[in-house]
Amino acid sequence: MIRIQLCEQSVRTFSIISIPGFLARAFVALMILVSASITTIAAEQRYALVIGNGGYATAPLANPVNDARLMADTLQRVGFQVTELLDADTSQMRRAILEFGRVLGGPDSVGVFYYAGHGVQVDGQNFLIPLGTDVKDTAEVALAGINLNELLKTMARASSRLNIAILDACRDNPFATNTRSLSRGLAPVRAPTGTFIAYATGPGEVAYDGVGGNSPYTNALAKVVPIAGLSIEQVFRQARREVLKVTNKKQTPWEHSSLTGAFYFNPTVTAQEASDAMAARLPGIGREAIGEIVAWDGIKDTTDPAILERHIKTFPGGVFTELAIVKLERLNNRPKKAWSWILTGAITARTPIGEAEEYYEKAIKAESDGFDAVSLTKAFGFYMLAAERGLPVAMFRLARMYDRGLGVERDLAKAAHWYTKASDNGNVTAMASLGTLYEFGHGVDKNLVRALRLYRLAAEEGDRNAMTSLGYLFAEGKGVSRDERQARRWYGTAAELGQPRAMFNLALMLMNGRGGRVDSKGAVKWLNAASEQKHAGAMRELAFLFNDGRGVNRNPIKAAAMLIAAVEAGNKDAHDDVRLKRRRWSFWTKRHMQRQLAERGLYDGYIHGFFDTRTRRAFDQLAEKANQT
């Protein structure tokens, strides 16, 4: 460790942990594909700039210096070369950011910028506040503070593969006595391509400095970042859950991403390029399951209960979670019990499983082999063998294949049969799926009373999809007396667990004051969260808000981008909005739609803001591509 003294404030630079990059066999070969070739991946250079400012003359903060030290140590543990700057003034921060941009250069580098301290927004622009800043008027903030957009541009210009900005900087206005016109909290920022921005709390909200040695947000991140096999999205999702818990839901961390690939702070044995290639082949499994598949292959033969417990906590509701529980209880030689406190997708089986475990593993790997007929048929056969031997999670996945016609001709009656068997053996996800069949009368006689009971049972065990469906029944008075407060409560719980449909439905209720007071700010927050998960309806709604300036600042660029994204995601209403309701959009929004379509190579006409045949044809091409997908 090298220690440099700057104007009585210290900068610590840690040397990078010596690792041979991520030279490893791609897990496509090691963990999933039986006969794939071995791949060597080039080393990835990791750099981090960590700043903690707390010793302000006005409105000092107790924890940012501690937070910066904790985050520096955490990032160092996962292979980052960390420069740490504590209680820095303007010139020190600017110089450190300049050097950070220089070291980041190169397509094989990853950069993390972390800041803890005061941050304010002025006219929608965010500024990080150095020490020694004496602001008398709002206009002076831009001169004395560090503009977040300029920082992000510095990182983007470095041409690094991926940039991450973590801002535990949403404490309240430090200049409250002189600059009450400053907006509360930080404003949302549009991330440059290849950038992930994480906020300690939602836009316009204020985060807690913390009553202990660290803020709730940084403390949560320090616990989750080192966990092996978690994607960046999983890391921040788990951190959000922890912050919600310790703050009694008073602080909700928030992220904005424009990443085009996956990233793991602490990958298991695989490199990023391999995981991207793998994810592209797994529409039936999902990107987030890749880390679990790899992790499971490394621990499946363990006899250490602690390792199995860690897997269960790290991957709640994962494809191997129920198997881990079965093994754990067998090792502990104790009767089966429900682990509803930790699971979102499964409860333990009632009987020992035996060889069903092996068939289940083979089924998962066959399904992962590729989303083609041969692989799916093979997976279906293994799921059947595992299900017939009594493994509830295999029963559920077998039912799902019947439900969706994957690897077998679609048969909703057989799907209902296996969903029922899995539900009878305590599989919560199967309960929710079976409830849907009863709600709509698919494969079974329509029975809203039974659907309601199944949704409620699954929701009380933590299944977010069941919570969303239960919220819908209450919102619409379907099979139950209409109760919008109950609907709003269930949507809210499911939204905090990351269910995009719940986020969207909750946002609409908040916007319209259904089930409680109007909350435009909360509605925008949940619409943004849902759109981050590619919910087309949320994108369309945001397009209207940005076009009209309702609940947000009018922004025709964002309005255009959101509407185009909604059409691209297959939302037919959004397509109709540009074909049949083009007068609904402002002149400037339509101009930016044309400009963005032109940038995609779909439009070659003038940028004039009038929807002509060429403009409509460009949107038709987007919609047609979405339908084909």
Image (cartoon, rainbow, N blue to C red):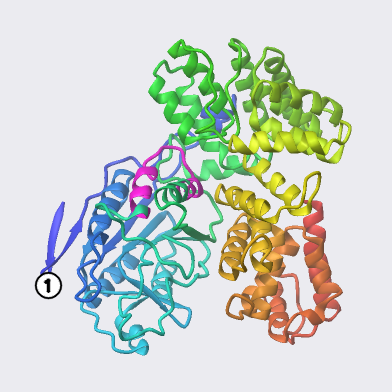
Residue 31 location in percent, x, y? 53, 28
Left or right, 565 with respect to 259, comes to: right
In the image, what residue occupies the spot 46% across and 25% down? 298
State whether residue 137 appears in this view.
yes
Above or below, 222 against 336 in this view is: below
Most foreground residue, 376 or 544: 544
Which residue is located at x 42 percent, y 51 percent?
243
Local SS, label 1: loop
Q: Residue at x 34, y 47 (%)?
A: 222
The front one of 280 and 387 is 387
Q: Is residue 228 magenta?
A: yes
Residue type at mark 1?
A: Cys
Q: Position of residue 317 (x, y in %)?
A: 57, 34
Image coordinates of residue 220 in percent, x first then y, are: 37, 48
- What range is drawn magenta here? 217-237
Residue 390 located left or right of residue 205: right
From the image, tell me which residue sits under label 1.
7
Taking depth in this image into account, of 549 and 211 the one nearest to the observer is 211
Q: Is residue 603 magenta?
A: no
Q: Quadrant of residue 534?
A: bottom right
Callout 1: few (<14), some (14-19), or many (20+) C-alpha neighbours within 10 Å? few
